[in-house]
Structures are given as structure tokens and as C-alpha cells.
Amino acid sequence: MGLDKNYHRSDSLSGNSILIVSASEQFDVVVKKSLKGFITIESRRSGSQARRAALERDYDVVAINAPLPDESGEALALDIAEKSPASVLLVVPAEIYEDVLECVTDAGVLAITKPSPRGRVDKALRFLMALRGRMRQLERKVQSVEEKMEEMRLVTRAKLLLMEKKHMSEDEAHRYIGKQAMDAGVSRGIIASGILEDYD
């Protein structure tokens, strides 16, 4: 069962959240030692349970202790890395580490061996948390740029309507929208939307 490619990110469910996927509760203890400041820490004991959880919400980090009772864990790691915004840690037995590393590295999954040297899981999780934080910053910047571009499109359309309907010059239309926005204490995009509604 795969994850829905058209996942919907819910801001109310995002931020400082981790999903631990492991058949062993001992792994939960190791991971939780590294998780200061996390709002949500959830555990699942199988790949199928983890997939259902990942459909219900987005996680910042998913830590998988392979193998799982119902699968090896590699497919789950690849699935989550491809179809969700989470950073993924995959912990695998040393004897299969090189093969697993070859399989998951290009997908952006961080793989480490077990048993691991003391502190290795902690450092890996801290790295992934920092990476996810930087990704969130980038997402906010992209959203801001998209909003600004949408506002520019609205203002351009509104100016064209003012030039056509009120016979304003481009400069007059530009100043008109700017003054209306300033007087009302709202964005130029909101004023432009109102102009478009008035004349549509």
C-alpha cells in the first residue's frame, strides 16, 4: 500500500513532529533521548501502520529501525521520502548496510548501521531536524514569492481594466491602486481583486 502522491500538508499538524517506526520499543527510547522540543512523537510497529500514519499527517522526521515485522523497511523509507515532506532516517543491520545505502541514497534517505557507535543516532537525527528546518524556511520563501507574483498578476489585470473602463494612463492606474491600498490599509492585491470583481 503506497502513500497518496497528492498528500495535503496541514499546518495545524506540522512542525516538530517525528514518527518512529520500529518493532522494538528499545529503539524508541534511543530516539526519544535526542528529541528535545518535539511537540509530537508517535510510534508505529510495522510498515503498514506507518503508511497509514503518514497518510493522516505530515511528519518532520521519520526514523525507521529495519527490518520491520511486515517488510524490510527500505521500501517504506523510499515511499515516505518520495511522497511526503519528511526527512527520513533508516537504521539497518551492518551486514546489509552497503546494499541499502546504494538503494536509498539518491532518494535523500540517511542510512546508518546498527549497532551504531554511541551518539550516532542522536547526530543523525539532529542533522535531519536541521535539514527539515531549512526546508521549511525554503518553503516559506517560495510561498512568499508565489504570493507576490500572484499580487503582481492581479494588479496588472486591474490596471488594464482601469485603463479600459476609466480611460486612465498606466501611471494613473498604478497610482490609483496604490493610493486605495494605502488609504484602506490593505495590500495592492486586495484592491486589485476588488477592481476585478467590480468590472467582471
Image: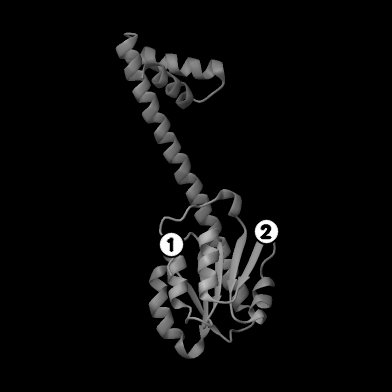
Of all residues shown, which one is farthest toward the top? 167
Residue 150 marker: none
Q: Is residue 199 left or right of residue 43?
A: left
In the rendered image, residue 5, in percent from the top left (x then y), is placed at 40, 59
Q: How is the rendered protein coloured?
A: one colour
Front position in the image: 79 or 121: 79
Residue 83 marker: 1
Report how far apart the C-alphas of labels 1 and 2 lie in the structure: 23 Å
In the rendered image, residue 121, in percent from the top left (x then y), is placed at 60, 76
Residue drawn at point x = 37 percent, y = 16 percent: 199
In the rendered structure, which amino acid carries the disc numbered 2?
Ile
Q: Quadrant of the C terminus?
A: top left
Vertical relation: 141 (above or below) 65: above
Residue drawn at point x = 48 percent, y = 78 percent: 73
**Residue contact at pointers 1 and 2, CB within 8 angstroms:** no
Vertical relation: 75 (above or below) 189: below
In the rendered image, residue 10, in percent from the top left (x then y), is placed at 54, 51
Residue drawn at point x = 31 percent, y = 8 percent: 167
Badge 1 marks a residue whose secondary structure is helix
> Which numbered disc flags the more N-terminal residue, 1 or 2?
2
Residue drawn at point x = 52 percent, y = 56 percent: 134
In the rendered structure, which amino acid carries the disc numbered 1?
Lys
The residue that label 2 is drawn on is: 39
Badge 2 marks a residue whose secondary structure is loop
Quarter of the image for residue 175 reads: top left
In the rendered image, residue 90, in percent from the top left (x then y), is placed at 51, 76
Can residue 169 be seen here? The reply is no
